Image (cartoon, rainbow, N blue to C red):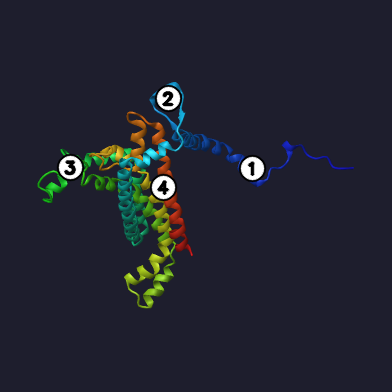
């Protein structure tokens, strides 16, 4: 006599099936919030989409025309150059400052380091737009605190228009961005320092190695992997910077602070509202970020993990 099979609704679910079932709501939310806008932007990028087309609901297919118009636009290349300069300055500064500050925190007592880590995390908790507005007040030509402090210290004799001068505007925007995102790198580097065995430093000190030699031959090799991770993540985010630009300079003066994300925004949402071209420029930016991430993973991350 053969045993009767259990109905499907009474069978015991495997661990993998249960995990997938529990993640279905999350996957649906991500699909609605992330996947659909990305796919729809790709659809818009190959169609002629303006206010008139949105009103009629008719989008003429243009193929790769929008991508060609973006690549032929001189302003796009100006924005790309500014983006590269911004990324190199912010990412390089973050890595150097993160290592220095993390080493300093690592030398303090446990109680002091906890308080310091809490204070360091405060800028990271501030919304990017709010951070930009705070620094726009600091940079203000008429009543900014930065000019007041420098004038009181005797470092300047006349107010400096930090965010309104084409020669200083892009560099002025890098400071608020570094101030907001630096805590992320500090925490990662500090965690990596905590994982370095103390015995290595003690043995090196017994062998006669000074502080510089211990840093060069022990700390730096042990931090290469986490620095590579920070390099990949911070480059991707810096390449898509937008909030500080919006709050402080709005791309000005002129095109001095036009970056790639600001270019996509202005093309799409400023008259004549070319949403197709704006979507194409956003896809080009995403492709560039993806290529940079692959290059980092291929030549940087793999090298330090071997």
Q: Is residue 127 visible in the rendered structure shown here?
A: no
Q: Is residue 215 above or below residue 244?
A: below
How far apart are labels 1 and 2 at the CA level?
Answer: 43 Å
Tell me whether the residue at label 3 lies in contact with that at label 2, contact meaning CB atoms closer than 8 angstroms: no
The residue to which callout 4 is attached is 288
Disc number placed over residue 161 in the picture, else none = 3
Q: Return the residue at label 2.
A: 54
Q: Secondary structure at mark 2?
A: helix
Of the numbered discs 3 and 1, the one sitting upstream in the chain is 1
CA separation, marks 4 and 3?
Answer: 33 Å
In what element is the residue under mark 4?
Answer: helix
Q: Is residue 19 left or right of residue 168?
A: right
Q: Which percent across, then down, holds residue 250?
A: 28, 37
Mark pair 4, 2: CA separation = 29 Å
Outermost residue toward the left?
157
Badge 2: residue crowd in 10 Å (few <14, some 14–19, many ≥20): few
User: Mark 3 or mark 4, which is nearer the start of the sequence?
Assistant: 3
Q: Which mark is residue 18?
A: 1
């Amino acid at each position: 006599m053969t045993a009767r099979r259990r109905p499907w609704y009474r069978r015991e679910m495997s661990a993998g099936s249960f995990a997938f079932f529990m993640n279905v709501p999350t996957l649906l939310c991500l699909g609605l919030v992330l996947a659909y806008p990305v796919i729809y932007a790709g659809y818009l990028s190959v169609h002629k989409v303006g206010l008139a087309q949105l009103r009629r609901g008719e989008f003429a297919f243009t193929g790769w025309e929008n991508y060609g118009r973006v690549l032929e636009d001189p302003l796009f290349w100006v924005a790309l150059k500014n983006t590269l300069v911004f990324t190199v300055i912010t990412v390089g500064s973050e890595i150097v400052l993160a290592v220095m500050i993390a080493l300093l925190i690592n030398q303090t007592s446990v109680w002091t380091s906890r308080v310091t880590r809490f204070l360091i995390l405060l800028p990271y908790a501030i919304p990017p737009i709010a951070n930009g507005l705070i620094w726009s007040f600091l940079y203000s030509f008429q009543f900014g605190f930065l000019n007041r402090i420098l004038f009181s210290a005797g470092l300047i004799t006349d107010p400096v228009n930090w965010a309104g001068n084409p020669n200083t505007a892009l560099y002025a925007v890098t400071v608020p961005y570094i101030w907001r995102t630096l805590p992320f790198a500090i925490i990662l580097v500090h965690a990596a320092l905590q994982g370095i065995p103390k015995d290595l430093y003690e043995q090196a000190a017994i062998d006669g190695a000074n502080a510089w030699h211990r840093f060069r031959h022990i700390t730096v090799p042990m931090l290469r992997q986490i620095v590579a991770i920070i390099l990949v993540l911070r480059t991707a985010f810096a390449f898509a910077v937008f909030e500080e630009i919006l709050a402080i300079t709005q791309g000005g003066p002129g095109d001095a602070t036009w970056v790639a994300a600001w270019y996509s925004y202005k093309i799409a949402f400023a008259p004549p509202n070319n949403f197709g071209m704006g979507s194409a420029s956003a896809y080009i930016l995403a492709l560039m970020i993806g290529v940079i991430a692959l290059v980092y993973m291929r030549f940087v991350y793999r090298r330090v993990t071997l």
